[in-house]
Amino acid sequence: MADNRLPPGQVRTHKWPVLDLGDQPVIDRRDWSLSVGGMVRRPIKWSWKDFMAQPQISSVSDIHCVTQWSRFDNRWEGIGAKTLLEAVQPDPEASHLMLRSYDGYSTNLPLADFDDEDVILAHSWEGEPLTREHGGPVRVIVPKLYFWKSAKWLRHITFTNQDIPGTWEAQGYHMRGDPWKEERYDD
Ligand SMILES: Nc1nc2c(c(=O)[nH]1)N[C@H]1C(S)=C(S)[C@@H](COP(=O)(O)O)O[C@H]1N2
Ligand SMILES: [Mo]
């Protein structure tokens, strides 16, 4: 039922294009860490070892890029957003997250969109470690939003009670980015 799966204005591709700011950081897993702070009860800083010690999940989802390509059935493995939320315990007032990456990229998203079974901090794709060009060691996957919200080379997450624009949002991309509503740009 491909028709039902393709959001408006999208074209299906079987390839997986690489898109980023152009600087693909080289991050050794031994040097990688993820820190989570802001409006949370328990800020954390996970090394690679800490991260891999968390319960692992696998999830299959579709990619929808704002540049109009979609790629179906991507199998991700990693740590579920639910596990992260349980670990840090966001404050009741927290409403949004800012994801920050090793290349200086940032993107914002509503906590309600992050807090879902299909959202994953992924270290593998189709059974193989995520390549550097696609955001390894760890990237975020938020299937329900355009792919620019799925930060590669994840480094830091901040919980806030404000919706603050990230890299593309500050340049006119939509603050939420729902592909089914074609929330591409802020008009
Ligand atoms: N850190 C970081 N994450 C990023 C980007 C980036 O430039 N830096 N680009 C975004 C955009 S616009 C897209 S479409 C996807 C592309 O991911 P891919 O290269 O794995 O297809 O990554 C998103 N995440
Ligand atoms: Mo994109």
Image (spheres, rainbow, N blue to C red):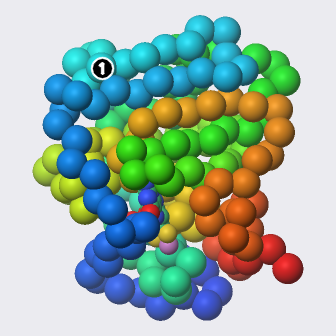
Q: Is residue 151 visible?
A: no
Between 90 and 56, the one nearer to me in the picture: 90
Question: Dot 1 corresponds to which residue?
Answer: 47
Q: Is disc 1's CB within 8 Å of ligand 1?
A: no
Is 94 situated above or below 185?
above
Q: Residue at x 29, y 59 (%)?
A: 24
Q: Position of residue 25 (x, y in %)?
A: 28, 52
Q: Is residue 131 visible?
A: yes
Is 39 situated above or below 12?
above
Q: Residue at x 67, y 16 (%)?
A: 40
Quick one: label 1, few (<14), some, or many (20+) residues within 10 Å? some
If the image is split into quadrants, where does the C terminus sit? bottom right
Q: Position of residue 124 (x, y in %)?
A: 24, 47
Q: Residue at x 56, y 78 (%)?
A: 66
- In the image, taking residue 136 as reference, residue 46 lies left or right, namely right
Q: Position of residue 73 (x, y in %)?
A: 35, 66
Between 88 and 6, the one nearer to me in the picture: 88
Kind of residue indicated by mark 1: Ser
Between 98 and 121, the one nearer to me in the picture: 98
Q: Position of residue 119 (x, y in %)?
A: 50, 44
Give SS at disc 1. strand
Between 61 and 64, the one nearer to me in the picture: 64
Residue 22 location, quadrant = bottom left
